[in-house]
Image (cartoon, helix red, strand yellow):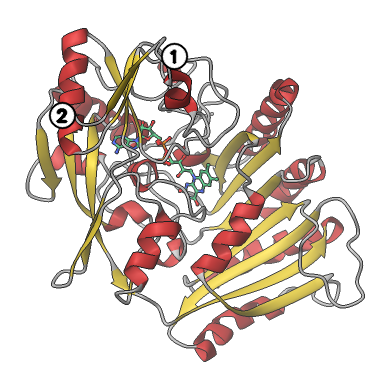
Amino acid sequence: MTGRLVLRGQEGYEEARVGRVFNARRPDRYPAAVLEVADEDDVVAGVRLAIERGWGISVRSGGHSWAAWSVRDDVLLIDLGALRSIAYDEATGVVAAGPATTGALELAPFLAERGRAFPVGHCATVGIGGFLLQGGQGWNGRARGWACEGVVAVDVVTADGELVRADASQNTDLYWAARGAGPGFPGIVTRFHLQSYPQPAVMWQDTWTFRLDDAEAVIHWLHDALPRLDRRVEPVMAATRLPDVPLDEGVPHPGGTVLLLHTTCMADSDEEALALLSALGECPVLGRELGHVTGPTSLAQESVAQAGQNPEGHRYAVDCTWTDAPADVLAPLLLDIWRGLDTEHSFSIWYGWAPTRVLPDMAFSVEGQVYVATYLIYTDPADDELYRMRVHERTAAIARQGGVGVYLGDTDFTRRQDRFLAPENLARLEAVRAARDPSGRIASYLTADRAGLNRHG
Ligand SMILES: Cc1cc2nc3c(=O)[nH]c(=O)nc-3n(C[C@H](O)[C@H](O)[C@H](O)COP(=O)(O)OP(=O)(O)OC[C@H]3O[C@@H](n4cnc5c(N)ncnc54)[C@H](O)[C@@H]3O)c2cc1C
């Protein structure tokens, strides 16, 4: 092996165990060893070593799983952090990227230089490994679909240590699973082959700041307007306490939590973007806004704003739900969460996704009209229980009223489980797992209740 193997108890173990985990709330789980691979061959060697020693295997690409899925007891943690090469094929527009490549920081600029794009995640530092395996909710996602729909092939080291290519014509079971299984994928992806698309000429943003007292009216209007909005228009309402929000001249920040309606749009020209965004000018509470800005933006600019909302070195308690609940049911529940935000960085979003589509044949299979996710962000370990309990209880209250399931990316099944795959897709995935990894070597979903996996309601 050319990478570094650090056994439990050896110097450097703690840094290797959790140093690349984004959430500063680090788990009390201890791998037997961590292998920081240097290349693909190391991954094969790592799997063979785990087989020899009788260890299970966990995997890390970008380290952004909120619940630190990569950190498991008594396994070999295979850390793919060095696998970040990117190569582009002009003839097909397919880009091959290592699993620890970051989306908006590395992949998007690489593609932009070639006039191409891919729906990378909203947070610039998320690794494409975990992101794509679980679906991938990225910029322009309402128009382009789930990022994993752009995966045309994956290179996979299987649970018995063989490197294979999986695509629409070979190892099709792995190809199907690689698009949605998330941490339940029975293999280690060493390279993703992604279909890029022509980069839209412009990206625009349109942001309104409202008092929370106006939120109910905005929610009602957006629920009604959403299914008719062009798919290139991506509206997100975010309740935030950050002071740096758009305010019209002379308008003071009211203090506490405000509501942002932040909409992005990728289009072929400025005129087209303006026309697409003009639908937002029909919001019934216009005139009551605290501030409004609109104009051209870029992924780089949007990423800076995201990073401000998701600071490093903080503790996070996170949960989400898809909901088809009507506005009059959802609004009071959302306001309950939004009014309860009490730390500087905590925020909660309503992300308009409707109208839903018939999804391609892939493991990913649960989405709803609206995505609600809440991120409670704090620094004191003594607050862990308070914020974890709060985020899961309040998200559960929404899920009970029209919730249709969750998106794996913002879950923590050690505290709250819900459906993330269609039942028939989970059954099919279990069959793939049984065939590909009969001894269950590769750590699957991290859950407090394995029997309750994917249970809804
Ligand atoms: C600040 C922040 C912002 C986020 N924003 C978004 C967003 O905009 N859109 C979105 O969809 N999600 C978002 N997420 C969620 C994020 O996409 C998921 O947590 C994802 O799993 C992170 O991928 P990763 O490779 O960085 O994480 P890791 O923790 O490295 O991986 C998570 C798990 O996925 C599996 N896995 C990862 N790579 C591989 C591989 N190569 N082979 C096999 N299994 C693998 C393993 O089980 C691993 O433990 C965000 C998370 C954070 C922390």
In front: 234, or 118?
A: 118
In front: 242, or 43?
A: 43
Left or right: 343 as drawn, with respect to 306: right
**Which element is circle 1 on?**
loop
**Which element is circle 2 on?**
helix
Identify the residue at horizontal 36%, vertical 11% (top origin). 74
Residue under circle 1?
A: 30
The mark found on residue 133 in the picture is: none
Quadrant in which the C terminus is drawn: top right
Compared with 339, 307 (above or below) is: below
Marks 1/2: CA–CA distance: 22 Å
Residue 117 visible in the picture: no
Q: Tell me if mark 2 has few (under 14), some (14-19) or many (20+) residues whose alpha carbon lies within 10 angstroms of its own.
A: many
Residue 95 visible in the picture: yes
Q: Residue type at mark 2: give it.
A: Val
Identify the residue at horizontal 44%, vertical 36% (top origin). 63
Identify the residue at horizontal 18%, vertical 17% (top origin). 49
Left or right: 113 as drawn, with respect to 279: left
Task: Give the residue furthest to the left.
Answer: 170
Quadrant in which the N terminus is drawn: top left
Compared with 76, 425 (above or below) is: below
Whole-percent x and y of residue 112? 36, 72
Whole-percent x and y of residue 85? 26, 52
Whole-percent x and y of residue 421? 38, 37
Q: Residue type at mark 1: give it.
A: Tyr
Left or right: 108 as drawn, with respect to 166: right
Residue under circle 2?
A: 44
Task: Give the residue furthest to the bottom.
Answer: 271
Question: Do the numbered discs 1 and 2 sit on residues whose CB atoms are within 8 Å?
Answer: no
In front: 409, or 450?
A: 409
**Mark 1 or 2 closer to N-term?**
1
Whole-percent x and y of residue 81? 35, 39
